[in-house]
Amino acid sequence: MAHTPGKYADFEGLREQATALRRAGLSRRQIRDRLHIDNNDILNRLLEGEPPPEWTKRPNAKDDLRAKARELRQQGWTYDRIQLELGCSKSSISLWVRDLPRPEPRYTPEEQRALMQEGLTRRRAADRQQHEKSKLSARIEIGELTDRDLFMIGVALYWAEGAKSKPYDRRERAIFVNSDPGVIQVYLAWLDLLDVDRERLSFRVLIHESADVEAAQRYWADVAEVDVSVFARPTLKKHNPKTVRKNIGDDYHGCLVIGVARSAGLYNRIEGWWDGIVLGSQPGSGKV
């Protein structure tokens, strides 16, 4: 029943009703609608001192982290170690535990470093696991490649990584250089798709003179599935003492250079295919 213009005259009676509804678990909106109260100030006065029911309180996503941070701090953990364990910022940790007394050191500096290293190792392992999970999911998304898929990939791959003629220097030779074994395998599969006879291919390693050249040739022979004996003389890059090299060690194999004999026709078709991709990618360009 709606209130008259003097509907708030019986304030105490209205307060008793509002209090009873609040204690029954109703929200402010429900009480307002039930008692037809359209003045927020009046509603505030009616409910003064009455706490809201638990179900109306919004949960804080960080409540669990805060509780855990306080628990670890009381156990004597440092901010750095709590941060590694929970993955939250130091500023948040400081706000959550600043009322707690500073704990006495439970570990020596050496033990602290060991514990932090242990936490860092766990975090890196979790990151690697997540990386592999994302990588596997993305791999599944690709599915099986059609011949056209491989054809388009190969054209783009060559134009990105292969040798290209210049207007002032028309060489028209298909030469491909790369250090990634996966890229090499895709390129060779593309040449097979184009029916390029493997007998027309030449292989050569491009590598720093300080590296294990023979091991690199064996490595690339396995990737390309050819015999080491077909490799031409390697091209050795001289070491610059002013340059700090990072591509060293057992994982360094240099680059593999793949040439195609009598490839002027193939090269010119690659140029045309790439032009077609570029034109076809433009909105409203139509078919070539």
Image (spheres, rainbow, N blue to C red):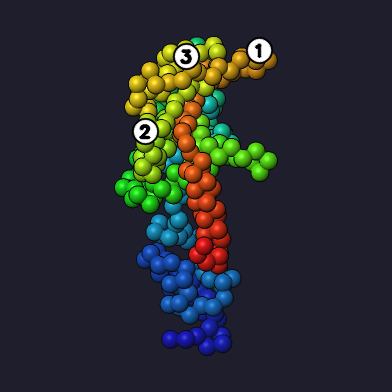
* Crowd class of label 3 (few under 14; some 14 to 19; many from 20; radius 10 Å): some
**Image point 47% across, 68% down: which residue?**
28
Question: Which amino acid, mark 2?
Answer: Arg
Q: Residue at x 49, y 17 (%)?
A: 233
Provide the residue designation for mark 3: 213
The kind of secondary structure element at disc 3 is helix
Asked which secondary structure carries label 1, the reply is: loop
Dot 1 amino acid type: Pro
Place of residue 207 in the rendered image (x, y in percent of width and height, measured from the top left): 52, 19
The amino acid beneath tag 3 is Val
Q: Residue 232's x, y, as percent?
A: 46, 20
Quadrant where the image shows the N terminus: bottom left
Q: Residue tagged by mark 1?
A: 241
How far apart marks 3 and 1 lie (CA) works out to 20 Å
Mark identifier at residue 55:
none
> Element at badge 2?
helix
Mark 2 vs mark 1, foreground winner is 2
Which residue is disc 2 drawn over?
A: 198
> Foreground residue, 147 or 242?
147
Disc 1 crowd rating (10 Å Cα; few below 14, some 14-19, many 20+) is few
Separation (CA) of disc 2 from disc 1 = 39 Å
